[in-house]
């Protein structure tokens, strides 16, 4: 055994496993809530303005869900687009991307020091939100 090697106890491993499980559950619950709120906002926006599409639709959904002014909602959609660009995607954000962005940014804002999420948001959101929307 190398000097400096840390021997992890079974108790420590169990605590880490339980903490990760609890974190995944909290992330899943948070993401599900934001997703449901976003879908409810989408249905309300479509009921009042069925012709909206693309960025204008996403901006209206963000504004409706979050209670933001149009300029603030537009900034959220723009940051979602920039986030995709940062990851090497050259296409415009779709609704699912905007919802992912809201989930991650809001989750991290509520939990200072968090460096991201560990759940697969794509797997959670794709069955709920049409990826082509």
Image (spheres, rainbow, N blue to C red):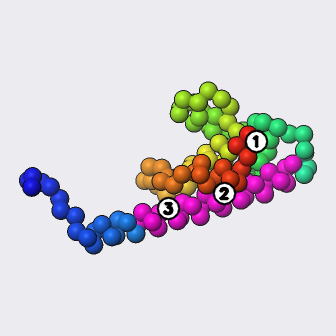
Residue 10 percent across, percent down from the top left: 26, 70
Q: Please name which of the two marks, 2 or 1, marks the residue nearer to the observer.
A: 1
For the stretch drawn in magenta, the main secondary structure is helix
Q: Residue furthest top?
A: 90
SS for dot 3 = helix
Residue 80 percent across, percent down from the top left: 63, 39
Above or below, 14 against 27 in this view is below
Mark linked to residue 133: 1
Q: Which residue is mark 3?
A: 24
Which badge, 2 or 1, is on the more N-terminal residue?
2
Badge 3 density bin: few <14, some 14–19, many ≥20, Cα 10 Å: some
Residues at circles 2 and 3 in contact by the CB criterion of under 8 Å: no
Which badge, 2 or 3, is on the more N-terminal residue?
3
Report whether residue 130 is seen.
yes
Q: Quadrant of residue 71?
A: top right
**Distance (Cα) linking label 2 and label 3:** 15 Å
SS for dot 2 = helix
Above or below, 38 against 94 in this view is below
**Distance (Cα) linking label 1 and label 3:** 27 Å
Q: Is residue 20 left or right of residue 79?
A: left
Residue 119 percent across, percent down from the top left: 51, 55
Quadrant (top left, top right, bottom left, bottom right) of the N terminus:
bottom left
Residue drawn where x is 35% and y is 65% of the image: 16
Does 32 lie within the magenta span? yes
Q: Is residue 131 left or right of residue 40?
A: left
Mark linked to residue 34: 2
């Amino acid at each position: 055994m190398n000097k400096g090697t840390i021997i992890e106890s079974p108790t420590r491993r169990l605590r880490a496993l339980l903490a990760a499980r609890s974190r995944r559950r909290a992330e899943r619950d948070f993401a599900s809530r934001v997703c449901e709120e976003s879908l409810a906002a989408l249905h309300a926006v479509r009921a009042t303005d069925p012709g909206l599409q693309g960025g204008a639709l996403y901006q209206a959904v963000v504004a409706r869900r979050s209670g933001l002014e149009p300029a603030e909602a537009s900034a959220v959609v723009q940051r979602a687009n920039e986030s995709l660009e940062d990851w090497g995607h050259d296409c415009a954000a779709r609704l699912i991307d905007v919802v992912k962005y809201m989930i991650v940014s809001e989750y991290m804002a509520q939990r200072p020091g968090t460096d991201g999420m560990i759940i697969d948001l794509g797997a959670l959101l794709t069955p709920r939100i049409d990826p082509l929307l």
